[in-house]
Amino acid sequence: MYTIMIVEDDPKIAHLLKSHIEKYGDRAETINDFEQVLDQFRQLEPHIVLMDVNLPSFDGYFWCRQIRTVSTCPIIFISARSGEMDQVRALENGADDYITKPFHYEVVMAKIRSQLRRVYGDYASKMEERTLSQAGLILYPERMELKLGEHSVTLTKKETVLIEALLDRSPRSISRTQILDKLWDDSFVDDNTLSVNITRVRKKLADLGIEDALETMRGVGYRLNVTWKDDTGA
């Protein structure tokens, strides 16, 4: 399941986009605070962004540039501005595609799917792709995907960094301080925030059929120790 962030100040359009995206089984999140778009992006860590141009305070071009300072995730503009220079400006500010209003929702979905395939799926570059693995569990950091056998789950950026750190240390443990340094650099984060991320990773592992692999080492930190048998019992 992918996460799509919708930056649209028309509540009706935002609601319809959200409803249509969720029909396809993905997660869609709309925002209400248009002065803190980058902060909400960092918190949500979406796989793709739908961005309007005409927004309160700062326009979509500004927020596109801000997002590009921290992420290369696909950004699709959806705007009533239909001029060629508006589309050129969007692309020059870091957008990947541009859709003019009014639009057909199926076209929006097709554009979303195209970008997701390009960045995370079948069309993503496989040249020298980095992987980490343990007992059949394979992490693809660049496409933020975790795979076991024929099953896979998509990850957020922080989930990817967390699992990578655990796999890199496995079967040794990694301290909470080391994890915090990897996830948030020098920013202050309380223990509860880390616990929430650990819980999310355990949920992703459970979705793959892996239970109790992420161990809490009291007074030390965490350890990932995967043992898995495929359907043949091998």
Image (cartoon, rainbow, N blue to C red):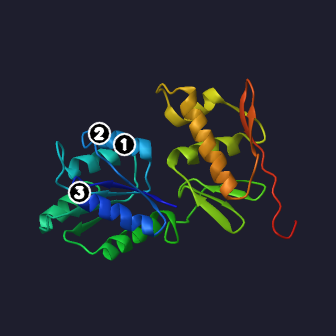
Where does label 1 land, which residue?
Answer: 40
Residue 171 drawn above or below residue 205? above
Q: Position of residue 61 (x, y in %)?
A: 21, 51
Left or right: 199 in relation to 74: right
Left or right: 65 in relation to 159: left
Q: Amino acid at mark 3?
A: Asp
Q: Residues within 10 Å of mark 3 (few under 14, many from 20)?
A: many
Q: Amino acid at mark 2?
A: Gln
- Which sits in the foreground, 107 or 138? 107
Gap between marks 1 and 3, in whole Å? 16 Å
Q: Residues within 10 Å of mark 2 (few under 14, many from 20)?
A: few
Residue 115 drawn above or below residue 73? below
Where does label 2 land, which residue?
Answer: 36
| Residue 127 location, quadrant | bottom right
Q: Earlier in the sequence, mark 1 or mark 3?
A: 1
**Res 63 seen here:** yes
Q: Residue sitting at 75 percent across and 50 percent down?
A: 211
Q: Position of residue 200 (x, y in %)?
A: 60, 45
Helix, strand or loop at mark 2: loop
Q: Position of residue 167 (x, y in %)?
A: 69, 45
Residue 48 drawn above or below residue 70? below
Gap between marks 1 and 2, in whole Å? 6 Å
**Res 181 seen here:** no
The tag on residue 52 is: 3
**Marks 1 and 3 close (CB-CB < 8 Å):** no
Location of the C terminus (image quadrant): bottom right
| Residue 89 location, quadrant | bottom left
Q: Position of residue 16 (x, y in %)?
A: 31, 64
Residue 197 drawn above or below residue 209? above
